Amino acid sequence: MRNAQRNARRTAQESNARGGGRGGSAGGPGRGAGRANARRRASLSLDSILETAIATLDREGSEKLTLRGLAAELDSGVASLYWYASGKDELMELAADEVIGRSLRENQALDSAGSSSPRDFAEFPVPEPDPRTSQQTKDALLRIRRLILCLFAQMMKHPWLAGQLIKAGPDGRNAFLYWETAGQQIMRMELTPSEQFHASVAAINYATGMGAEISEGIKELAAEQDREAGAREQIREWEASDPDQYPFIHSVLGVVGLLDHRSEFIAGLDLLLSGLERQTWTGSGRSAG
C-alpha cells in the first residue's frame, strides 16, 4: 500500500513536471508567481532529493537529517518532499534503497567485466574452493561473495546505511531484489529449500549486522582526535588484563593491531561462505542437473 501511494505521488509529480497539470493563461503577478513556484516544486525530482539526502546523511548523520533542512538545501518547500515521502522515516528508507541499488549496479558491472571483487577488495585473494565442491557451487559462492562485498563497500562510503537496513528490513524494492539476487545463487547449490532459506538469511544478516558494527566503529574513530592513539590505548587496556582470566584475548593481541575494517569483514564473510560450501558436500539437496 505504501509503495502504491508513493508511486501514485511520483506519477502525478512527473505528469506535472511534463506540463500535464492545469493549464491556462497567466493572470496577475501574484497568481503567475504562484504557478511558477508550483512548477519549480513539481520539477524537483526524486533523484535530486535522494542525492542531496544521501550527501547530508554522509556529512551529518541520520540524527541531523530533517525534511525542513533538506528542503532548504534544495531551495524548495517542505511540501515538495511529501510528493515522495510521508516523513523522515520513509525518506531514509528511500535513501537506503537507492544506495542498495548502487551496490546491485556495481555487482552487475563487475560481472560484465569478469571481476571477482569490487576495487576496494581487489587485494584480498578469493579463497580456493575444496575439490569436493561442484563447479556450479564454486561459481555461486564467488558471485555471492562479490554481491556482499559490493554492499559492504557502500556501507563503508555511507556509515548510516547498515543501521538503516537493520531498522527497515527488506521492504524496499532494491532491498528485496538484493535478497532475491543472493537467493538465486544459493538456489544453484546442492541444498534443500530449507537450507537455502537459512543460508540466504545468514548471508544477508552477516552483511547488515557486521556492517552495522563496523560502521559504528568508523563513526567512533571519526570522532577521535587521534585515531591511532585511541587504538593503541584500547590495546594497552587489553594487555593490562589478567592473562590467566583472559587467555584468548592475550593470544590474539598480536593480530588485533594488524586488522582494519575491510580485512575484519572479509575474514568473517569467507568463514561463513566456507561453512556454506561444506554444507553442500552432504548432497542432501543435490538436484539432478
Image: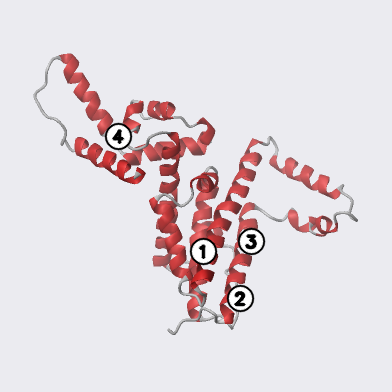
Q: Earlier in the sequence, mark 1 or mark 4?
A: 4
The quarter holding residue 30 reads: top left
Q: How is the image coloured?
A: secondary structure
The label number, if any, that marks residue 278 in the structure image: 2
Task: Give the quadrant of the C terminus.
Answer: bottom left
Mark 1 or mark 4: which is in front?
1
The answer to which of 130 and 1 lies nearer the viewer is: 1
User: As shown in the figure, which amino acid type bears the numbered disc 4?
Assistant: Leu
Measure how far apart labels 1 and 3 are at the Cα level. 16 Å
How far apart are the two marked residues, 1 and 4, measured between alpha carbons? 38 Å
Choose mark 1 or mark 3, whichever is in front: 1
What is the total number of numbered labels drawn onto the structure image? 4
Tell which circle, 2 or 4, labels the residue nearer the N-terminal end.
4
Q: CA distance from mark 2 to mark 4?
A: 51 Å
The residue at the point 61 percent across, 40 percent down is 219
The residue drawn where x is 72% and y is 56% is 258
Of discs 2 and 4, which sits in the foreground?
2
- Mark 3, other Cα within 10 Å: few <14 / some 14–19 / many ≥20: some
Q: Earlier in the sequence, mark 1 or mark 3?
A: 1
Q: Is residue 88 visible?
A: yes
Label 1: few (<14), some or many (≥20) within 10 Å? many
Disc 4 target residue: 44
Tell me how far mark 2 sits from mark 1, CA to CA. Answer: 15 Å
> At label 3, which amino acid type do we have?
Gly
Q: Is residue 210 left or right of residue 106?
A: right
Q: Nearer the viewer, residue 99 or 22?
A: 22
| The label number, if any, that marks residue 268 in the structure image | 3
